[in-house]
Each structure stands twice: as structure tokens, then as C-alpha cells.
Image (cartoon, rainbow, N blue to C red):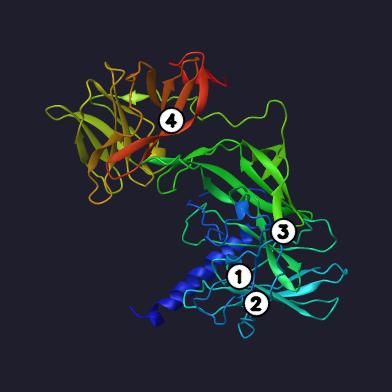
Amino acid sequence: MTTHDTVPGMEERLRAALAARAELVRPEDLEPLTPVVELRPRWQSPWVLLATAAAVLLILGAVFQGVTGGPRSDEIAPKPDEQLQLPPDVGRDWKADDLSSPARLDLDGDDTLERVEFLAEPTDEHDGRTRVQTTLSSTGEEAFGLVELGTTIGINALDPIDADSDGDQELVLYTTDLDGGPGAPFEPVVLDLRDGLLVRAVPEDPQLLASGDVVVPGSETEYYDRVHVQWFGVDGATLVSTRSVNAFARAAGGMTMLRPETYVVDTFEWTLDDRGVLRPGEPSCRVQVPEATTPCDAASTDDLPYVTTGSTDTIGVGEQVALEDGGLGYRARIEDQGGPTLVVDGPGADGSVYALNVPEPRVHVVSPGYLVGNDGASVLVTSGSDPGAMEVVVQTADQGGLVRLRPVGEIALGSGSTADGRAYRSWLTGAGVLVSAVAGDDGSWETWQWVRVGDTEMAALPWGTICFDDIEDPASGRAC
């Protein structure tokens, strides 16, 4: 396929994605996005080991003339005792993308707002640099810079800030990563006017200022990793960020994350020092609730794992039931066909059969739909005589047949004891979530949620700690 064939479709996709992202990034919001890749800081060049630099300013202008392939000035940091050198002027003939909107803010502190335009470097993938330019109202001189934001489509600024409290304002843009998927981290880009240049302020802790699902280093496993949920925004004239105190398990591939509805976050206000470094203040405690944050109190904590109900209604051989499966319309029955056999009827699965492998099989009326992650049938089978026997049978996507999901990973399914002698127990909640709990040494239980990780495999993700008055009764769950 030629470039001419692919560019219009790519442009349409990029424009739609960036328009959606622009709608999400609102200064008044502190609601995290749900959805991650490793951070790729702009300053990871060997030129810029900024964590040890005494002065960290990134000149946002082109270093070599040309619009393709040249080094960016945000890859070079001046030494503390050097004057900033005006870079060659690049991008005057670039055009603003029609989804980009000029920003208005007082860059030079004269109480008159400058109009800042964003000119897009022309590239096939719309992933080039952006020229940021304005005319200063106080002197009539032009100020400009060059920055790379991941795309040149739909560049829009957040509300301005005054992070150094000097009376003028700093411009706040943000990076984007369209290939990272839901929750992929993105970063604020704070530009300060210095010596006729728009200079990027560098965060003391870049990862802390990222927004999205930020992976905890070293937490990666074959089936999940752990992430902090983070967000940044502008509150008044202050750059603010939040970070979940606890890290939450996220399935490999990023489609499932066990984030509670309510959780505690650290909140940081960022200031700009005279060296051009953004520094976080001391964290304050907030509670993230849907659509907002609220102040903490002495009892503030994350929601408990949603494991305090249990599905107990089942059918046996010779019985049938319409599954509680979110309205998918499946029916299940157990027949004796030379042995107990599960038969499922419904969309794409009429008469599908599976030979059951547990003694005295019982089929739960509630379907483990949260585990499956698709619109097919799913059935939990337990045993009337062996409390440790349990299997999940699901409809395959291709021909509508039924297969058993094989448990993989760290946790066993069913009930019994681990290799180190700790008790574990599994059950299906009334909402169709399959969970396991493993006993701790202090009377608490570590809970895990099962998710599908392949066509015929499922694995458990760590969910959180809870205590039970009686582990046989999930309704007795409480905070420890």
C-alpha cells in the first residue's frame, strides 16, 4: 500500500484521537484516566542527565537548520555558567493545524496577554515538531521555541500558571502517546520566557508529574504489573498533580485494572525555581472519588475489594437454568450422557456440550462474566462432594464449542493449602467475579481476582487485603 493510500486514514485517526484527548484534559478535573507503556522522558538523551545537572533548562529551538531529522534543542541543556544561545530559526513557514487553538497568556508580565501560535512541522505521520511563537507586547520582539509533543494535530494549552510567583505566566502544553493505549502516561510541558526564548522547565521527578497509569519499576510479571494512577492539571495558577498512594494490579495488555472506585492519593503543588526546575511540594492527602477529590480524614482508605457476596444457587444433573449473564441469553443444563455433561444453548452455542470432570457437578446460576471479557457463554462448575474442585467452562470464539480455562500463575483455584501451608479459598461473587483469598499470618486474607489471559487460560491478579469473621461467609468481610 502506498503512502498516498495510508496518510488520509492515519490523519483521520489522529485527528479523532487528539480531539478526544483535548476534551479530557481540563484544568478543573483531577479524574484519572483508565488504561500503559513505560514512560519515555524527553530528557533521556545522554546529553541530558538532568537529575545531576545543577541548572536544567532545555532550549526549545532548532539546533541545526532543516525540518527533518535534526537534533531538537530540548535534547541539550546549557551548563550553569553559560549564556543561552539563540538557536537557528526554524519553522516560520509551517502552518497551524486546523484543530490547534492559539493560547493567550501574559508571558512578559506587563498585564497584556500575548497570542501564542502553534505551527506544525509537515510530516507524513503528523508526529513532527511544533513551533511555539509569539510577539511580546512589552517590546514588540518575537519569542519562539520548538517542542515535540508526540503529534502536531490539535495542539491546545491548559490554563497558564505562575509557578515561580514572579508576576508573568508560564505556558502549559502536554505530550501525548496515541500508540500507548488507554491509560498511557503523558506529561505536561511547561514553557517559561527567558532571554527571548520559550524554555522548557524540567521536573525534578518527571515520573511523579506524568499522568496516566505509571508502572511501578520491578513489578512486572508474566500476567500483570502494578501501576500508580496519576493525574496533573491546573488549579488557579498552580500546576497540581495527584498519585495514588497504593499501586493497583493491571493485567498484561492493559485491558483490566483492579482500581477501587474510591482511593487515597497524594497531591503535589509544583513550583519553578530560579534554575528552571519544577519541584513538587510536600504531599497532601486527598481521596479520589468518582469525578472529584475530597479532603482526607482519619478514616480515609481505599475501598475494600468487592468480594463480600457469594453465589450459592446451583443446579445438578437433570436440571437446567437461564444463566444470570448480563442479559446475553444463555441457558445451561447438566445431562447424563454416559457421564455428567454440560449443555449450553444460546447465541452461537446451541447444544454445545462439555464432559464435566468434577464429582457430583453443580453449575452456578450466576455466570463468571467478569472473567471472560467477551460476549460468549461462561459457566462456573463446582462439586457437591469436593469443596476444593472448581472449573470454569467458556464458549470459544470461533465455532461456539465449550472449553475449560486452565488456571495459570501464582494462585490455585478452588480450596486447599498452599505449598507453605497457608489456606486458600475461591468463590464466585453475586456480581459474577471469580475470586480467591489466601490467608496471611496475621488473620488477614489477600484477595485475588481471576481474569482471562488467553484462549484457554486464566490467571489471578492481586486485589487487596481484607479480614473475615468467617472465611466461609464472604458477607463477613471487613476492614482489618
Q: Compared to 445, does 186 lie above or below?
A: below
Q: Is residue 164 left or right of residue 80?
A: right
Mark 4 or 2 closer to N-term? 2
The secondary structure type at the circle numbered 2 is loop
Cα–Cα gap, marks 3 and 2: 19 Å
Let me know if residue 154 appears in the view. no
Q: Which of marks 1 and 2 is nearer the N terminus?
A: 1
Dot 2 amino acid type: Pro
Classify 10 Å Cα crowding around label 2: few (below 14), some (14-19), many (20 and above): some
Badge 4 is on which residue?
Answer: 448
Q: Do the residues labelled 3 and 2 touch (CB within 8 Å)?
A: no
Instruction: Identify the residue at horizontal 28%, vertical 18% (top origin).
Output: 384
Location of residue 399 with respect to 177 vertically, above or below: above
Q: What residue type is labelled 1?
A: Ser
- Amino acid type at circle 3 is Gly
Please tell me whether mark 4 or mark 1 is closer to you in this view.
1
Picture disc at residue 276: 3
Q: Which residue does the numbered mark 1 point to in the structure image?
A: 73
Q: Name the residue under label 2.
A: 87
**320 vs 243: above or below:** above
Q: Distance between the residues labelled 4 and 2?
A: 55 Å
Expressed as whole percent of the image width and height from the top left, the position of residue 379 reads 32, 34
Q: Where is residue 451 in the image (x, y as percent from the top left)?
A: 38, 38
Per the image, label 4 sits on a secondary structure element best described as strand
Query: Label 4: how many residues lie within 10 Å, few (<14), some (14-19) or many (20+)?
Result: many
* Cα distance between the residues tagged 1 and 3: 15 Å
